[in-house]
Amino acid sequence: MPGSLRESLSESLGAFRAVLGNRDLRLVESAGAVAETGKWLYIVALDVYAYKVGGATGVGIVNLIRVVPSAVVAPFAAVFADRFPRQRVMLVTAVARTLAFAGAAAAVAIALPAGVVFAIAGLVTLLGTVFRPAEAAVMPSLARTPEELTAANVAASTIVSIGSFVGPALGGILLAITNVQTVFAATAGTFLLAALVLARLRVDRRPERALSEVGLAGEVFAGFRTILTDRHLRLFVGLYGAQTLVAGALTVLIVVAAIELLDIGGSGVGYLNSAFGVGGLVGVALTFLLVARQRLGSDFAIGMLLWGIPLIVIGLWVNTGVAIVAIAVIGVGDVLIEVAAPTLLQRAVPDEVLGRVFGAVEAVLIAGMGIGSIIAPALVAGLGTRGALLATGALLPVLALLFWRRLAAVDAEVRVPVHEIELLRRLAIFAPLAPPRLEELASRLVPLEVAAERDVFRQGEGGDRFYVIDRGEVEISVDGKHVRQEGPGEYFGEIALLRDVPRTATVTAVTDVKLYALDRDEFIGAVTGVAASREAAETVAGARLATAKPPGLAVE
């Protein structure tokens, strides 16, 4: 195995081990696995119930109920993820869905009107629009490193892939030996188990945030504003929406291709959908190797190619075996996109608006799915099945090639400052900070090179920066007298900032040194915003003041 591949694999394995060793991430992933199973049990049973009471029209109505409210309500529901502790939002919605599924089971068992069951389906969908942004937004605060965050998203994608493959099969088996109300009751049980797991999560320390002066409407549309005012987010979410439009079209084209083009009947629809799930599992293995690479924009572009080119192949080469392999390749591309997209958003968006951004993105994605499913029949009617496959398949490769450089630039500009994060994490005054805040601070460090025997600053000067030593050694002196010497991983400059006084010592480079500087406002905001950080900083400042020479003089 080449050294670079072996090194990447080792880093990826380390990231996945870290996810398993991270108690809260492990709980979130476990709850997600249980809930994903329950979701598919519910979908299968609901579609069967809808068909029994209303035929194909009933299925269409219930799917409309599941899609339209989500697109409309998602930005509103996501406000909860930014106003309240996200772990509590997830727990409350899991409990609410447990009760809703139990209600659906009871409604079917006592033969209440179908409208009651359909209304519960709409309620369950709305609760999902509250849960998903909170889940996506809480992940960065639980992950301890950038690689761990990506690995956590890979694990979540794995759960979805396995769920889309195993869930429907389990639902079919239960329906074969029991009935719809029993499957609904089983679904309630899975969400109750998920709620019990989520109840063990440590709640984040963010205070509940009141509505800002912009009011509810301003809060709701803050996610859209954040996306529209950032050129990278604008591009990324636009392309993500295009990918879901093609995904929506595929839900129709896969049926038409199986029945009319490949002539493999209704069972062929199942084969092709299963191929998508198998491809997703292969994609997980591939993404596993890419965790250490951290090139999210490029991975997203590759995923777009893998979504589009196979559809073109199916349109050009009508063969069942080719179609199954092509759909499996789309499954691979889907995993690449579903890992790259949320990870990039989690890194690029400020924590205070992250939930609402995910709510806005969800609205865009749901709308894309709906539009795609509407456009596909029109394409088939106008261009024929093969023409519709070719036209739909061409969209994403064209967009990927047009914007490839800009997507690659995202990797360069949204660089993860891994070394700087580790440097700050080792300092007691920053260790209590949440990972997103630590990464934000690390990205704002300014690198400085100071030659040997040059002063970093002199006693009596104004204090405007905090310093961390990355390489080399410095001497601390007061009134020309040596106090101490500091080296890599140590810091200085905090007392002038914390006490708002002039520099109380002179700091001189003993050797050539590399420093990282943090501006006053950034330092004060980070240290005073978290009680544990403030206490650690005051402890260090007090100790240095106590040992200052001459007595009573503060030393940096």
Image (cartoon, rainbow, N blue to C red):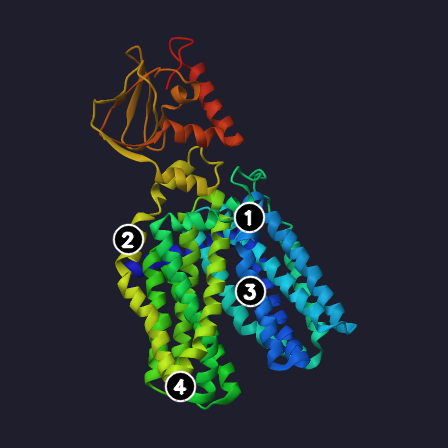
Instruction: Kindly identify the residue that appears in the image at 71 percent across and 60 percent down.
Output: 99
- The x, y position of residue 71, in whole percent, is 53, 61
Q: Is mark 2 on a helix, strand or loop?
A: helix
Q: What element carries label 4?
A: helix
Question: Does the CB distance between marks 2 and 4 fall below 8 Å?
Answer: no
Residue behind mark 3:
68
Point out the tag, 2 or 4, that comes first from the N-terminus: 4
Point out the tag, 4 or 1, that comes first from the N-terminus: 1
Instruction: Kindly identify the residue that appears in the image at 60 percent across and 76 percent down.
Output: 59
Residue behind mark 4:
321
Q: Neighbour class for label 1 at 10 Å: few (<14), some, many (≥20)? A: many
**Whether residue 500 is situated above or below residue 285 in the rendered picture:** above
Point out the tag, 2 or 3, that comes first from the N-terminus: 3
Residue behind mark 1:
79
Q: Is mark 3 on a helix, strand or loop?
A: helix
- The x, y position of residue 357, in whole percent, is 47, 51
Q: Which of marks 4 and 1 is in front?
A: 1
* Residue type of the residue flagged with mark 1: Val
Q: Is residue 550 left or right of residue 122?
A: left
**Whether residue 144 is situated above or below residue 458 in the rendered picture:** below
Q: Which of marks 1 and 2 is in front?
A: 1
Residue behind mark 2:
409
Point out the tag, 3 or 4, that comes first from the N-terminus: 3
- Give the distance between the C-alpha atoms of the residues marked 4 and 1, in whole angstroms: 46 Å
- Give the distance between the C-alpha atoms of the residues marked 2 and 3, in whole angstroms: 35 Å
* Residue type of the residue flagged with mark 4: Gly
